[in-house]
Amino acid sequence: VTLVASLRDIVGETHVLVDPDLRAPYETDWTRRFTGTARCVVRPASTDEVAAVVRVCAAAGAPIVVQGGNTGLVNGGVPASGSEVLLSLARLRDLEPVDVLEAQVTAGAGVTLEALQAHARAAGLDFGVDLAARSAATVGGLVATNAGGVRVLRYGSMRHQVTGLEAVLADGTVISRLTGLAKDNTGYDLTQLLAGSEGTLGIITRVRLRLVPPLPARAVALIGLSSTGDALSVLARARRLPGLAAAEVCYASGVSLVRTYAGLGAPFSEDFPVYLLVELAGGSDPTDELLEFLGGCEEIGDATVASDAAGRTKLWAYREAHTEAISAAGVPVKLDVSVPLAALADLVAELPTTVEKVAPGARTILFGHLNEGNLHVNILDAGASGVELTDAVLNLVAGYRGSISSEHGVGRAKARWLALSRTPAEIAAMRRIKAALDPNGLLNPGVLLIDAE
Ligand code: FAD
Ligand code: MLT
Ligand code: ZN
């Protein structure tokens, strides 16, 4: 019996895709930079089916690439070797009723962030993570990458929302911890071990998630500034505002791309080098508090404020549409780094020169989550310099004791640079964990940990 026939016995004929046209949407990543060929795409609909698929693949020695919404940005969820079975979790879409008493919900790995948010809101609660890929990114992918997004300063990243999960390990065993106890110190926290493990230790099938109180009243300011240093001064003061809900930074080059892509007018009568988006949220209208705050910041060149939903969405678009606008302009070399805030302005100043030295004429577009010192470094028109650029930028970041992956994960795209952010002892410990849980290297080979070169 062939592997494909065994997989069809488990999930049904129509959910094992071998035709190249049917496989294609799963085989190329969102940025179009990473592409590969899968042996087949298999689409199970339950945890039991996932476990059976894993057992069959393990018996055949077929490596598995795990995929949720395929919005990941670090080459972790598409095939690389041609021998992998691509396991899509998109059909695990069960969304249990919200447990209002615990303010928690259990969601299948394939539930999209948008569906989860709508479900929580319908129950009078909200979800603490938000990001622009919400319509496609899945709960499983968000946990596996420990995604961040635009609410981290208030609620933390994805792992902080997770109170338990269910997962299939590389030998097909199922671990399940979905009670969601608020306190539970009974040994190793396997849930948190799997969060951020990028599909290398287990396949997440269901997740128990914490929900947060809704904050219906919001006010957003888009602020024009002269420098990153000024943006940091405004942030330092904004931290004292109890309602601070977001602090996002972008720059003239990105805003110009976004305006062309999204057809947006200029936010101000003059252009600024730096733009800071600040949002306050609470139970009652925070507009006056925001206006008073802005009035007290002498660094501010200009500012525009919106409190109504349409106006807020418009201001957010200057920041949120960056990813799409950049990808519409080309296939970027996309890096995601963080440094201590005290070093951020220096990093921003040095990046264009660093890029120019390696790839003359390339365009560097920076934006990100200011509160976490998290800068998205996107380089367009890099030609064939992707590896050299990555090396130069990540070494620069390491020099500031920063992280080579702030929120997107390491994937295959950054695996060879892991040692810039983690010590040999840490990497050795990670390898021992991987070897214990996946001794045959079945799950996401080449992601996060690669054989020493
Ligand atoms: P995929 O892309 O399918 O997979 C991502 C990784 O997780 C892969 O390594 C995959 O093997 C693994 N994986 C997926 N599902 C599972 C599972 N069930 N079990 C085990 N492993 C699994 N990221 C941020 O952190 N912050 C942002 O603000 C942000 N904004 C984005 C905006 C846009 C427009 C886009 C395109 C992406 C953005 N991302 C952001 C990146 C991406 O959305 C996140 O990394 C997201 O968590 C990926 O979810 P996914 O379901 O698409 O996962
Ligand atoms: C964002 O913050 O918009 C994302 O992380 C996506 C990106 O880096 O392009
Ligand atoms: Zn981001």
Image: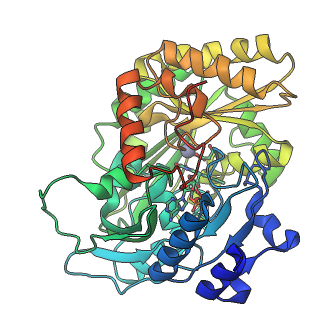
Residue under the image location 72 percent in, 56 percent down: 83
In the image, residue 160 above or below residue 153: below
Q: Is residue 286 visible?
A: no
> Camera-side residue: 333 or 205?
205
Give the camera-side residue of 34 and 52. 52
Q: Quadrant of ligand 2?
A: top right
**Residue 117: % across, % down:** 46, 72
Q: Residue at x 37, y 61 (%)?
A: 285
Work out which quarter of the rendered image holds the C terminus and state it.
top right
Query: Measuring 66% from the left and 20% from the top, which residue is drawn there?
Result: 391
User: Which quadrant would residue 354 be assigned to in this image?
Assistant: top right
In the image, residue 332 lies at what x, y percent? 77, 38
Coloring basis for residues: rainbow
Left or right of 137, for residue 109:
left
Q: Which residue is nearer to you in this view: 370 or 337?
A: 337
Of residue 449 and residue 387, the one placed in the foreground of this image is: 449
> Can you say whether 448 is above or below 97 in the image?
above
Q: On the rendered structure, is 333 left or right of 141?
A: right
Image quarter of the N terminus: bottom right
Q: Is residue 86 visible?
A: yes
